Image (tube, rainbow, N blue to C red):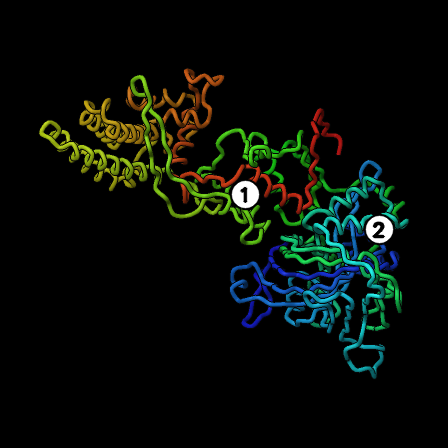
Amino acid sequence: MMDRPDYIYTNGSPLEHTPMHLNGAEMYGFLIKGNKTKLQATVDATLNQVAGNQTTFRVLSPYVMLTFTRVNHAQSGFSTDHDRGWGKECDIIPWIMVGQIDESGGAAKLHRLFIFPSYTWVDVPMAISIGREIFGYPKNFCKLEMPEAGDDPVEFKIACEGWEPSNPETQLGIQPLLEIAATNREHEHVSVSGLAEIVVGGLKLLGSEPDLLSLDMVGIEDLASMLLEPQIDQLFLKQFPDASGTKAVYQEVVVAPTTIDKVHSASLLGYTYECTLHKFDSYRLDETLGFQLGTQPVLLPFHISMDFTVEAGEELARATAIAPEKIVAAKTNEEMLRAPATDREKIVVLGGGPGAMAAAFYLTDQPGWRDRYDITVYQMGWRLGGKCASGRNAKLGQRIEEHGLHMWFGFYNNGFDLMQKAYGALNRPAGTPLATWQDAFKPHNFIVLTEPIGNGYRFWPIQMPQKDGTPGGHNDELTFIEIAETLAAWIRQWVEGLKKHLLQLVDKEIKEGVDRLEGIWHGILGFATRMRESFHLLVDGGRHPVVAELQALRASVFESVDQYLDDDDAMRHFYICIDLAITTLIGMHVDGIMFKSFDVVNDIEFRAWLCKHGANVRYTVNSAPVRGLYDLVFAYIDGDSARPNIEAGTMLRGMLRLAIDYHGGFIWKMQAGMGDTVFTPLYQVLKQRGVNFQFFHKVRRSDSRER
């Protein structure tokens, strides 16, 4: 997408940002048979005229779905616009079913389904501006009659502003265009469970038509699968003329996903209806859609009460300066079958684990990706998630079953960035389960470790501080100076805690230890104050007084509390934390991590690295925090806890990010299974975007020569 300036919203502008939430919508729909040749000519003169040779859109059916919709609550989901208020509107739209066909292997396959609003009439002037300028709806003003809530649906009328007949002497006025009227009311309306039953009825009708589309049964099944999705794509010709009204300063084909958030009720209407079309030169539906002037039958009348959302549009094709004679009309179905394979690059995603889903998500997060890629995810079974998959056991009260405790740490910026985008794209209605990522993940800061002491175990409860911010891609990378400053602050805090604990045990015997710690605490305070300057002055590979000072502080702390470590849990916990932090600072300088990277010590095992830099072997090297880190990442050869093995640099990087670089909560607990909170949203977004999923497929061979 080309770089463009920000749109200037002037005071009083009626325009609003996407997404648009249209709730309490009462839609009545009718299938009216048009003429497929005339419909295709309309699509060629609009969508295909703009798309040129970039892609071709083809009409799939001669039937047009005419809808009368009363929207009782229309409001932007964009915070600034949402706070301005909401409105109502009624709209009447004849929808043309349009598809893109993927030709590969000599067969025509329906790649993507659209509904194209060939006309749009509304009764609210502000809705005209928003619809036209944001999405590209061809909106015009009208007067209409349609049932109010609870009324008997017997009559629908629309009168539009225009000229009839077209004549220099004709004044602009309101003229009748079309009516839908019940001619037989003997049969009752039939309630259905939702949109799916209406779609199935429509497919049965369309499938009986010999000129529906030259698709085989697989193509018909693809069409059914797309129609039964809770989201369908609206297709628009969006354009703005120059000041002369002859050239377009902007002209593109735009698609906007529309998601049905909730169906309140649905029914197939039992009445028999007929449509009456009047001659109206400003709106020649007989020429553009192929409707009959006068009366013609109406099929599959339905009513649905629902909430739905129109998302931000995506540009599919941009007009180029190409001569009109070089724009070819849509190919016939026979020509489609003989056409060469699509030029889009085929991308295969193997498996449905976290890495696979993230790759598919970010590939489809690029503007115009459908013009470049045809993406298919292959999954051996029916459940996405890999080792993170989860399910529910219906026999045990829908109990969540998964491979273990699933939580995300507060430094998982990439993971949270992905989920924030996925939940934002879904834009689930407020109040629904797991509507936002904040509903799916909650901060948690209390953990308990266990220590093997003697012949038993003792608990080590740890309350991590709640921090400001939220995890996500907006956070900056942690620097080595920030690591050093944070560790110094923690050391000072732990020494102060150790001193207070000793004071609680006041007696003459330990008075000397308290005095010693007082001096140590002042030393730590002074050290922390000059920390930034000290580490900026360090020289790679050299010795520096700050290292010797750290070693002396560590030795002083041990001498002060050595005699109490076996029996006093709190004393031991403070000491282990101080020893780990000081040893980490020493090792990071001595081994050059501060000046290179953590990778420079990946040739040594982490516990050996702690020993190398003087950590207490008896209390610290095999302490509960260290053992917990190994357990967390399964860092044992063949799962044998007697053979720990992990690179020192890898463990250091993870340990410091875990303890220092979290945002909001130390841990973010999922409020349902990982399938519910992570993989269902990702699947729904990817399906909406047009990614293909093939379940129960196992890859046996890959040949890069094949497309």
Q: Nearer the viewer, residue 436 or 336?
A: 436
Crowding around mark 1 (Cα neighbors within 10 Å: few <14, some 14 to 19, many 20+) is some
Q: Amino acid at mark 2?
A: Leu
Q: Quadrant of residue 701?
A: top right
Q: CA distance from mark 1 to mark 2?
A: 42 Å
- Percent across and percent down for residue 31 are 81, 58
Q: Quick one: which residue is furthest to the bottom in this view?
A: 169
Q: Amino acid at mark 1?
A: Leu
Q: What residue is shown at x 85% (from left), y 55% (from top)?
A: 62
- Percent across and percent down for residue 439 are 50, 47
Point out the frontmost of discs 1 and 2: 2
Q: Nearer the viewer, residue 435 or 151?
A: 151
Q: Residue 71, relative to residue 315: is it above or below? A: below
Which mark, residue 205? Answer: 2
**Mark positioned earlier in the residue sequence (1 or 2):** 2
Crowding around mark 2 (Cα neighbors within 10 Å: few <14, some 14 to 19, many 20+) is some
- Percent across and percent down for residue 481 are 34, 39
Q: Is residue 172 visible?
A: yes
Q: Which residue is mark 1?
A: 418
Q: Is residue 13 left or right of residue 188?
A: left
Q: Quadrant of residue 291?
A: bottom right
Q: Nearer the viewer, residue 665 or 42?
A: 665
Q: Residue 254, relative to residue 153: is it above or below? A: above
Judging from the image, what secondary structure is the residue with disc 2 in?
A: helix
Q: What residue is shown at x 73% (from left), y 46% (from top)?
A: 226
Q: Is residue 605 left or right of residue 561?
A: right
Q: What residue is shown at x 82% (from left), y 65% (from top)?
A: 182
